[in-house]
Image: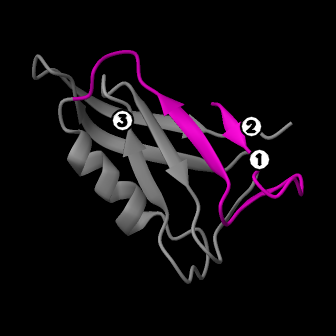
């Protein structure tokens, strides 16, 4: 993952972002975005994380909202990821490493 520590405090919190890269174009990208904005609570958040796809729908940038934190080793799991051809992967898990 590409990580941006906007406030340079060596942790991922509000305003910081990371990129999740997929091997193929994601066909159901809107559904995956809602996993981030709806289910990625990451603690008692005041504002939700945002999810922005690149034009090719292969990279998803997640920006944390107010009150959210993400620690090294935390994971994000997607189920039912579909590519443009309609092939479905049961589960994809990302683990963010902060070094």
- Against 48, is 23 above or below? above
Tell me what residue is drawn at x 27 percent, y 21 percent: 25
Quadrant of the drawing holding the C terminus: top right
Relative side of 64 to 25, left or right:
right
- Marks 2 and 1, the one that precedes in the sequence: 1
Q: How crowded is mark 1: few (under 14 residues within 10 Å), some or many (20 or more)?
A: few
Q: Where's residue 82, x and y in %?
A: 20, 30
Residue at image position (57%, 69%) is 65
Q: Distance between the residues labelled 3 and 1?
A: 20 Å
Real-space CA distance between mark 2 and mark 3, rounded to the nearest whole angstrom:
19 Å
Q: What element carries label 3?
A: strand
* Labels 3 and 1 touching (C-beta < 8 A): no
- Give the colouring mode of the picture: one colour
The local secondary structure at tag 1 comes to loop
Location of residue 70 with respect to 58 vertically, above or below: below
- Specify the principal SS of the magenta part: loop
The part of the chain drawn in magenta is 1-26
46 displayed left or right of 3: left
Residue under label 3: 91
- Of badges 3 and 1, nearer the viewer stands 1
Tag 2 residue: 97
Mark 1, residue position: 72
Residue at x 30%, y 47% (from the top left corner):
32
31 sits to left or right of 99: left
Give the residue drawn at x 11%, y 16%: 85
Mark pair 2, 1: CA separation? 5 Å
Q: Where is residue 79 in the image (x, y as percent from the top left)?
A: 31, 42
Report the number of numbered marks: 3
Q: Front-most of 49 and 40?
A: 49
């Amino acid at each position: 993952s590409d990580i941006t520590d906007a406030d340079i405090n060596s942790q991922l919190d509000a305003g910081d972002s990371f990129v999740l890269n997929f091997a193929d174009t994601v066909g159901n990208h809107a559904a995956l975005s809602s996993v981030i904005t709806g289910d990625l609570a990451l603690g008692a958040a005041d504002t939700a994380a945002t999810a922005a796809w690149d034009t090719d729908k292969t990279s998803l940038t997640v920006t944390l909202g107010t009150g959210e934190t993400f620690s090294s080793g935390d994971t994000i799991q997607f189920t039912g990821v579909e590519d443009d051809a309609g092939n479905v992967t049961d589960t994809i898990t990302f683990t963010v490493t902060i070094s």
